[in-house]
Amino acid sequence: MGKITVETCEIEGLKVITPTVFGDARGYFMETYNYNDYKEAGIDQVFVQDNQSSSVKGVLRGLHFQINHPQDKLVRVLSGEVFDVAVDIRQGSPTYGKWFGVTLSAENKKQFFIPKNFAHGFFVLSDYAEFAYKCTDFYHPNDEGGMIWNDPDIGIEWPIPEGTELVLSEKDLKWDGIRAFTEQYRNNR
């Protein structure tokens, strides 16, 4: 290995990856993904779709997931800085409902691996950010799920500066919390 450093998180399955960056007077070079290195690090996934978004300061996207077609995600920031969050929604997990957050930026070049059955979201800290991620399943518009970003039962500590006017989509304002999600799961078993 040696081309990437992998940090495990307190929630099983989540991993923060830091690539090796080779820099000189011309700039830098790094591998953003190498199947063999990731497989050796325990991330043996086949990614089938790459997505990219741009957002301005104050945008909060999430918390999103797919219900019947869950996706593993490998996320990173191309420009700017975001606070990225994953919430464990794996039924029966000892860390169900717990969250983990990490700052991803163009400067630190870190990546965040989020396994299936986690809700995911991010908050833009910089004036502008470009966000990219790989997925192990295709996007299915009729399979979208979500949870409200500020659910007190989850208690995410978003680093939102006082006085910041959040920019959220209409859809992201309408999600329920984890209690409704849990109840819906119980009723559908």
Image: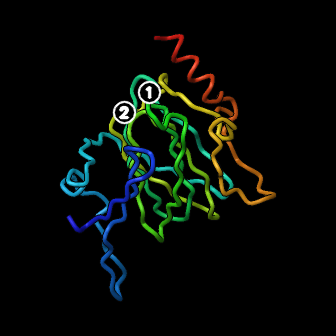
Q: Is residue 182 above or below residue 117?
A: above
Identified at 54% across, 40% down, the residue is 98
Q: Position of residue 94 (x, y in %)?
A: 46, 35
Q: Outermost residue toward the bottom?
A: 25
Near mark 1 (Cα within 10 A), the count class, few <14, some 14-19 or many ≥20, is few
The quadrant the N terminus occupies is bottom left
What amino acid type is highlighted by mark number 1? Gly
The residue that mark 2 highlights is 138
- Which mark is on residue 92? 1
Identified at 51% across, 37% down, the residue is 119
User: In the picture provided, is 77 more to the left or to the right than 127?
Assistant: left
Q: Secondary structure at mark 2?
A: loop
The answer to which of marks 1 and 2 sits earlier in the sequence is 1
Near mark 2 (Cα within 10 A), the count class, few <14, some 14-19 or many ≥20, is some
Q: Position of residue 132 (x, y in %)?
A: 44, 52
Front: mark 1 or 2: 1
User: In the picture provided, is 137 more to the left or to the right than 164?
Assistant: left
Q: Is residue 160 above or below residue 179?
A: below
User: In the picture provided, is 132 more to the left or to the right than 101?
Assistant: left
Q: Outermost residue toward the front?
A: 94
Q: Nearer the viewer, residue 187 or 65?
A: 187
What amino acid type is highlighted by mark number 2? Phe
Q: Secondary structure at mark 1?
A: loop
Identified at 27% across, 48% down, the residue is 43
Q: Position of residue 138 (x, y in %)?
A: 36, 33
